[in-house]
Image (cartoon, rainbow, N blue to C red):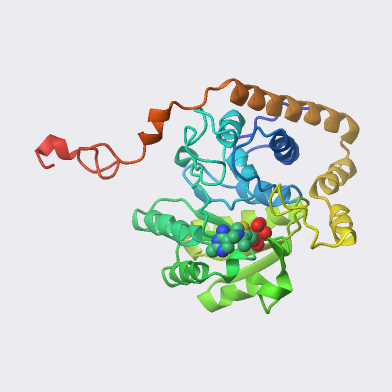
């Protein structure tokens, strides 16, 4: 099997076969990472809540794969995979989950709010849906500065019923901003089933009210997500304005690790597990002539080693010193207001 070193966003130039194996690796790595995090949580090694995205890997993989450097992504609380897809080092991500000094926020927070702006990842917000206007704001900046980038905002169907989601999408529609809204519709907002919190079946139907298109796809079918995201993101990047992609899916675990999800029917879970995105993609690869047994073994081993290296890094990292709690909170006096602004101390203005 070729080494999977295809650059992100290089769909056009990389041989398709190598690219597809890379996609497979990403889904496997995300699944292995999240499964390990669930286990570490039971061992009391994780600080704060753990919101597993197991079952939803095809969405983060398929949406993020066509993105470019400089694009901006606002993940939801269930999207550890977004960090991996954007090139954040899994060791730093694991350190964030363990509250270590080497984590993204240097031990100041759990996974939930840790972003990484160097990789264009905004930390998710506690208030559901509040990251939608932030993504619209990032897209406004891209438009004003004529930068060839897009913003992507992930959200759940539960969050889609919040007011600021409406405001953010309306603003993006009015100003034709380069932003793609991605709804991971896993049918439950914590314990609330879809039909108890919205009167329509498809969140995508709401897009028309904001003046842009809504698309629906199977979020468990990597190729379906990818085909849609490549097309929609390219149009948005080309200046055609926002779009909404709704991916129908299901989360395997509870809302978080403390939730046994007893409000769900066992049969329903089994049905969705039978549509698992990973074996479906393996079936596709096999039909295309790959020796899937061999590839699975190699990729599983690679993913296992990558996750183990992340755990080793995080476990051997120190916890932050108490005084570090006060660092990186406010800009130091005299710091430039923005990276492009002149330093106030250089012209005497303080
Ligand atoms: C404004 C707001 N209301 C309620 C909550 C509590 N809460 C956190 S996650 C969640 C469910 C979110 O469901 P959804 O948006 O569908 O995403 P999912 O967790 O299913 O991925 C709720 C109710 C919150 N964080 N913010």
> At 60% across and 26% down in the image, what residue appears?
314
Q: Quadrant of residue 264?
A: bottom right
Instruction: Write down which quadrant ligand 1 falls in.
Output: bottom right
Query: Where 91 sits versus 170, above or below?
Result: above
> At 64% across and 70% down in the image, what residue appears?
204
> At 50% across and 68% down in the image, what residue appears?
169
- Decide if residue 65 is in sight here: no
Q: How many marks?
A: 0
| Residue toward you, 117 or 263 | 263
- Decide if residue 102 is in sight here: yes
- Position of 247 with respect to 239 (left or right) is right
Please state, as top left, top right, bottom left or bottom right, where the C terminus lies in the image.
top left
| Residue toward you, 16 or 157 | 157
Q: Return the x and y of residue 218 as percentages of the image width and height.
A: 75, 60
Q: Return the x and y of residue 256 as percentages of the image width and height.
A: 69, 50
Query: Where 302 sits versus 27, above or below?
Result: above
Q: Return the x and y of residue 141 as percentages of the image width and height.
A: 37, 55
| Residue toward you, 14 or 30 | 30
> At 85% across and 46% down in the image, what residue appears?
284
- Position of 297 with respect to 216 (left or right) is right
Q: Return the x and y of residue 110 as percentages of the image width and height.
A: 55, 41
Query: Where 126 sits versus 34, above or below?
Result: below
Q: Residue furthest left?
A: 348
- Position of 184 with respect to 223 (left or right) is left
| Residue toward you, 254 or 151 | 254
Please state, as top left, top right, bottom left or bottom right, where the N terminus lies in the image.
top right
- Position of 256 with respect to 323 (left or right) is right
């Amino acid at each position: 099997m070729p080494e999977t070193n295809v650059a992100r966003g290089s769909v056009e130039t990389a041989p398709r076969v190598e690219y597809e194996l890379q996609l497979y690796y990403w889904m496997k790595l995300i699944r292995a990472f999240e499964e390990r995090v669930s286990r570490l949580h039971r061992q009391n090694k994780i600080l704060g809540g753990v919101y597993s995205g197991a079952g939803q890997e095809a969405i983060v993989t398929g949406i993020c794969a066509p993105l470019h450097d400089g694009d901006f992504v606002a993940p939801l609380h269930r999207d550890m995979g977004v960090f991996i897809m954007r090139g954040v080092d899994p060791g730093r991500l694991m350190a964030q989950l363990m509250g270590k000094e080497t984590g993204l926020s240097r031990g100041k927070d759990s996974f939930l709010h840790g972003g990484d702006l160097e990789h264009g990842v905004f930390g998710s917000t506690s208030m559901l849906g509040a990251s939608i206007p932030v993504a619209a704001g990032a897209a406004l900046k891209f438009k004003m500065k004529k930068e060839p980038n897009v913003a992507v905002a992930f959200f759940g169907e539960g969050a889609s019923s919040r007011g600021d989601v409406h405001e953010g999408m309306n603003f993006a529609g009015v100003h034709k901003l380069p932003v793609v809204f991605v709804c991971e519709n896993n049918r439950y907002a914590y314990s609330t089933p879809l039909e108890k919190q919205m009167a329509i079946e498809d969140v995508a139907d709401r897009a028309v009210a904001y003046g842009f298109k809504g698309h629906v796809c199977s979020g468990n079918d990597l190729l379906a997500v990818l085909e849609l995201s490549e097309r929609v993101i390219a149009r948005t990047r080309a200046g055609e304005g926002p779009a909404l992609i709704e991916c129908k899916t299901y989360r395997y675990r509870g809302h978080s690790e403390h939730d046994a999800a007893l409000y769900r029917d066992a049969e329903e879970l089994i049905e969705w597990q039978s549509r698992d995105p990973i074996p479906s993609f393996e079936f596709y690869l096999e039909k295309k002539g790959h020796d899937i047994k061999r590839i699975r073994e190699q990729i599983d081993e690679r993913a296992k080693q990558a996750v183990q290296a992340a755990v080793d890094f995080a476990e051997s990292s120190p916890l932050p010193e108490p005084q570090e709690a006060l660092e990186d909170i406010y800009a130091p006096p005299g710091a430039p207001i923005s990276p492009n602004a002149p330093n106030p101390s250089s012209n005497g203005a303080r």
